[in-house]
Structures are given as C-alpha cells and as structure tokens.
Image (tube, rainbow, N blue to C red):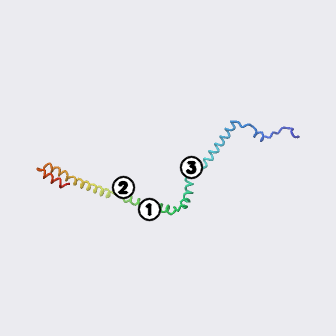
C-alpha cells in the first residue's frame, strides 16, 4: 500500500478539529458538575473544617502568646466551680455573684425554715406599722391639740 492509497483518517486530529457544539458543552458541564458534587460530598463541611483548623491552630497560637498556663488554670477552676456547684445543689442551694436561693426541690426543713423567717419578718414589719394606726386613732381620740402633738412627736 502506497502513501495516499486507502484513506485512514487520523481520528484524533479530526476529532480535535471538529466544531464543539452546545450539546457537547452541556454534556461536559454536567459531567463536571457531577464530579464536583462527588468531590464535595467527600470533603468535610465548612463547620467541620473550621472546627478542625481551630483545634489545630489555636493551641499553637495560645502557646505562642504564653496563654497555655492560663488556659489550663481556667479549665481547672471551671471544673472546681462545677464540682462545688454540684455539692451546693445537693445541699439544696443555688447561687450567683449576687444572690443565694433554695432549689425547688430543696430539703423540706430548709424550705420550712425560710418560710418561718419570712413570716416572722412580715409580722415585725406589720408590728412597726401598727403603731402608726394606733397613733392615728389616738389623734382622733385626743381632746386637745397638745395631746395630738405629743402622740405625733412620739412617732416622728
């Protein structure tokens, strides 16, 4: 066979030189979209990625700033606070920086003691106000202005 006899087209060259139509473009684009979706499914999410990077980088940054000892100390103190709060709760109390309260399920003796103290304080408050009521009655019953003045001066 001589050169030129029989035509054996160079399919690679012919394929490369053929026009690229819209249908072919769409097919390639779909293949790439599917490949991207598969790759994306295999990768970690943004949240997971952020968490992983923070877990790796922040300890190094903290060490570089000399914060490692402080972090260890804060973690230890938090555990101590949690343990102490648990003990306090088992005794029937809650607290914050400004107040102390009884837990809703505190021992009955604590609740009773608190309620008794509240009743006593209310009685004392009412007792201190009762003298004013008596003084008002005394002023209405006074026979002279001088008697009324003496009653009022005794309270003020």
- In the image, what residue occupies the spot 55% across and 53% down? 51
Distance of label 1 from label 2 (alpha carbons): 20 Å
- In the image, what residue occupies the spot 32% across and 58% down? 110
Crowdedness of circle 2 by 10 Å Cα count: few (<14), some, many (20+)? some
Residue 11 versus residue 146 in the image, above or below = above
**Placement of the C terminus among the 4 image quadrants:** bottom left
Q: Position of residue 16 (x, y in %)?
A: 75, 40
Crowdedness of circle 1 by 10 Å Cα count: few (<14), some, many (20+)? few
Q: Residue furthest top?
A: 22
Dots 1 and 2: beta carbons under 8 Å? no
Residue 119: which numbered mark, if any?
A: none
Residue 19 versus residue 126 in the image, above or below = above
Q: Is residue 121 left or right of residue 60?
A: left
Q: Label 1: which residue?
A: 80
Q: Label 2: which residue?
A: 103
Residue 46: which numbered mark, if any?
A: 3
Q: Quadrant of residue 11?
A: top right
Q: Residue furthest left?
A: 143
Q: Position of residue 27 (x, y in %)?
A: 67, 39
Most foreground residue, 30 or 130: 130
Q: Indicate which disc, 3 or 2, sits on the residue closer to the N terminus.
A: 3
Q: Is residue 28 left or right of residue 7?
A: left
Distance of label 3 from label 2 (alpha carbons): 42 Å
- In the image, what residue occupies the spot 17% across and 50% down? 136
């Amino acid at each position: 066979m001589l050169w030129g006899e029989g035509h054996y087209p160079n399919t690679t060259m012919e394929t490369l030189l053929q026009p690229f139509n819209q249908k072919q473009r769409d097919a390639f684009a779909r293949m790439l979209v599917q490949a991207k979706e598969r790759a994306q499914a295999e990768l970690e999410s943004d949240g997971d990625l952020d968490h992983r990077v923070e877990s790796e980088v922040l300890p190094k940054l903290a060490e570089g700033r000399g914060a490692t000892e402080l972090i260890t100390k804060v973690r230890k103190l938090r555990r101590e606070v949690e343990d102490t709060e648990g003990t306090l709760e088992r005794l029937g109390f809650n607290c914050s920086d400004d107040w102390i309260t009884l837990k809703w399920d505190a021992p009955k003796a604590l609740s009773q003691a608190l309620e008794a103290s509240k009743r006593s304080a209310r009685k004392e408050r009412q007792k201190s106000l009762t003298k004013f009521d008596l003084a008002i009655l005394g002023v209405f019953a006074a026979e002279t202005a001088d008697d009324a003045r003496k009653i009022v001066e005794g309270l003020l």
